[in-house]
Amino acid sequence: MGKIPVRAGPVNSTAELVGHRTAFANRRRDSDSKREAILHTAVKMFLDKSYSRTPLADVAEQLKITKPALYHYFRNKEEILLECYRLGLALIAEALDEITALDRPGLAKVAAFIRAYTNLITIDFGRFVIRLDESELSSGVRAQVRKFKREIDHRLRSLIAEGIEDGSIGPCDPKLAAFAIAGALNWIATWYEPAGPLTVEEIASEFARILTQGLAGKPAGRAKGKSA
Amino acid sequence: MGKIPVRAGPVNSTAELVGHRTAFANRRRDSDSKREAILHTAVKMFLDKSYSRTPLADVAEQLKITKPALYHYFRNKEEILLECYRLGLALIAEALDEITALDRPGLAKVAAFIRAYTNLITIDFGRFVIRLDESELSSGVRAQVRKFKREIDHRLRSLIAEGIEDGSIGPCDPKLAAFAIAGALNWIATWYEPAGPLTVEEIASEFARILTQGLAGKPAGRAKGKSA
DNA sequence: GCGATTTCTTACCCGCGGGTAAAATGTATC
DNA sequence: GATACATTTTACCCGCGGGTAAGAAATCGC
């Protein structure tokens, strides 16, 4: 149960993976770092192929051990999933805490949220939380997951409501606005690829701008500068 | 290969389901309507539990037949999926065609797209296309699906580019803007439930507004016309 | 009503993947 | 280096689900 470093930071992920791959090189009794290696490897594979289509045997293989060895560290597959989930959730909650504490107008907080959330997709565990499909879970776990997600959703709604109150956000349904934002952000996890041309910062900035300012050109007062 | 009525319209879906459920009541040789019944039932179940976690035996059970009977109408499970997918895709393409043909500024077209796309989530096949997770597919089919999706994405980008050109949309990266919009919309398929409090029209309008106009209150040139 | 044909069922096979039993192998401790 | 304990492995079991073979049952055309 030691604290697992979740934020690997912009470390070369290959190097990191190798690190985890060697965690089982010998049988030293170092159960914490082995748990950590399992989780890091598993979450990467879950992201790659989805939880339910990633056999534990494959995870084990990556770690150069056999499937039953995993059961020494986790009771079953779902416990691995849940642990990954918890780690990711902690990241999100942490970001949200920081933002909530800011002393700025609601709109600025929402923009900050968009930036923070976008950054999460570069972290495996955060990305995993975003992408996890509830329907893959057993009903017991699903209830927990739903609760967590709902909480995040509600906190985002509060941010928006706050903005409406202080006037930085125009009148709108905070529920729908939150869904729109969450959708745009969650979807990033679907198409983003680290090797791609877009940096996370670019995405974060542009999304913050589009979602807060909208697409429309400056009609300013009224004149529709354009016709076409 | 008869034309399958995909748009059930705002028909009571229970009644419809019953209709499909009785399609196999007798052994009349009516292969077209049976194929149709299979697809409608399957797509509903795929939406409910995801494709890969919906056993064909369950689909058959709903239809009051047995699994092997399905193989009389489709070669394998993936062919059923692909057929559902094609039907949904036709809907989307159709909507997109109509919008592209409109003689209005780019921004208005984008807004129209948002409305049309939102409406698709009330139609099972459309919703299915949106929700389908590529990773559930065999690599052959995945390639096709990817191609289709990319095409839709590119058409949306064109709409945006058009708007930038005619000035109705402010300068932005059409690619990222398209991702933001697509994300917000696709996500609807995740949380929307027909029995819920929000009508599709409400969602469509609010999303069109938020995504085109943004959240920000009217700072207009400067005057804060609004206050709470 | 009779054969030809389609439609559907019963009874399977098989591979995959989660999970376990029990024994083997290594590591700490004395 | 013997003992105890943690760690891993080999060899399984089992249920699930896609898919098939072979025949039964209904329907169609005449």
Image (cartoon, coloured by chain):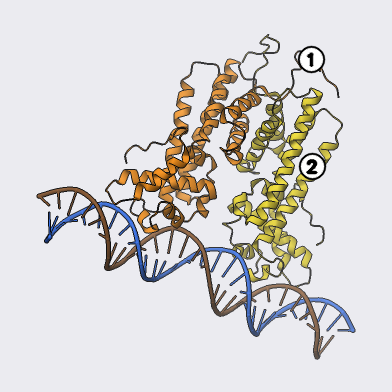
Chain colours: A orange, B yellow, C brown, D blue
Residue D5 vs residue B145: left or right?
left
Neighbourhood count class around disc 1 (C-alpha, 10 Å): few under 14, some 14–19, many 20 upward: few
Is residue C8 placed above or below B146 in the rendered structure? Answer: below
State the image coordinates of residue A48 (x, y, percent, origin top left): 53, 47
Residue B137 visible within the image: yes
Q: What is the chain identity of the residue bearing mark 1?
A: A
Identity, as a three-letter code, of the amino acid under mark 1: Arg
Mark 2: which secondary structure?
helix
State the image coordinates of residue A37 (x, y, percent, origin top left): 39, 45
The residue carrying mark 2 is B95
Mark 1: which secondary structure?
loop
Q: In terms of depth relative to the viewer, which is nearer, A144 or D25?
A: A144
What residue appears at the point 58 percent right and 20 percent down from the top-left corner?
A107
Separation (CA) of disc 2 from disc 1: 31 Å
Residue A81 vs residue A118: left or right?
left
Residue A150 image label? none
Residues behind callouts 2 and 1 on a single chain? no
Q: In terms of depth relative to the viewer, which is nearer, A174 or B98?
A: B98
Residue B115 visible within the image: no
What residue appears at the point 40 percent right and 49 percent down from the top-left corner?
A79
Q: What is the chain identity of the residue bearing mark 2?
A: B
The residue carrying mark 1 is A222
Neighbourhood count class around disc 2 (C-alpha, 10 Å): few under 14, some 14–19, many 20 upward: some
Is residue A74 placed above or below B66 in the rendered structure? Answer: above
The C terminus of chain B lies in quadrant: top right
Residue A212 vs residue C14: left or right?
right
